[in-house]
Amino acid sequence: MTPKRTLAKVPVRKIKDGASTNEKDLVAAEEPLEIRISGEAAGKRFDHGIAVTMRTPGDDYELAAGFLHTEGILRNPEDLREITYCVGADKQNQQYNVVRVRLRDGVAFDLARLQRNFYASSSCGICGKASLDAVRAAGCEAIASEGPKVPAKVVLGFAETLRARQSVFEKTGGIHAAALFDAAGALVVLREDIGRHNAVDKAVGERFLAGQTKLSGLILFVSGRASFEIMQKAAMAGVPAVAAVGAPSSLAVDFAKEFGQTLLGFVRDGRFNIYAGAERIEA
């Protein structure tokens, strides 16, 4: 058996110009993914489920690695022993819906903090982070003042590149994307998912598994809005600038200012707004 598909065919009745037809339609797949973490520390073995997220199947190892990195659990790729599917863990219903992240022996983590603060869903991201202080306590540091200087014309090209490369969106019209660009506008990685925060974790996870933990030379571009959890994940990965097709939330703006990030919104149709960190944008 292979991992589940990113697309699914469903029967629909289409109404157009007064006529009704029965057809098949493509929709983005949505399945739960449980992320488990295991290893040995202080002579004791541990194996804990730490999050469940509704995601579009695909790039699940990147999603798990990115989630653990952006939540401050995995600091270095060297801490990671392997990532595997728990195939057969829950019979047929959960095939490829459980991922186990094995840490190297001696690498520990704070399970109590995880149990207090983490729950993931496709709509809200990681809930329970009530304040900027909580993020700082989790190990999130302010972004250094230096960083890429990005010409405005480069920013304006992000949306076109994203649309051209969103293969699942092209087929379904119902999925989010997150992309990492360099300061010259070159696409480094793009990932799609039904959840905005999942797409970010997948993109960051791809870089993490490639050995890159501080993405200080890159810009994160997301479809949809810029929310608190998106800014948090970017900051934990060291990304200095976040741009979004849609609007930012008030807490996203507060976060960007507090942690020294550049935040851009409404990046589309030849325009965008700068909500924080204007010094990184060259008009």
Image (cartoon, helix red, strand yellow):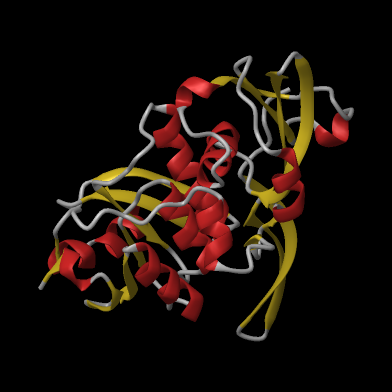
- Residue displayed at 29% across by 56% down: 161
Q: Is residue 123 above or below residue 116?
A: below
Spot the residue most to the bottom: 18
- Residue displayed at 51% across by 51% down: 199
Residue 90: x %, y % from top left: 88, 30
Q: Is residue 201 above or below residue 16?
A: above
Residue 163: x %, y % from top left: 36, 59
Q: Is residue 161 above or below residue 51?
A: below
Q: Quadrant of residue 124?
A: bottom right
Tell me the quadrant of the picture where the C terminus can be found. bottom left
Is residue 2 in view from this perspective? Answer: yes
Q: Is residue 22 above or below residue 115?
A: below
Residue in front for this viewpoint, 92 or 34: 34
Residue 48: x %, y % from top left: 78, 32
Q: Is residue 105 left or right of residue 156?
A: right
Q: Is residue 93 left or right of residue 111?
A: right
Q: Quadrant of residue 41?
A: top right
Residue 253: x %, y % from top left: 41, 75
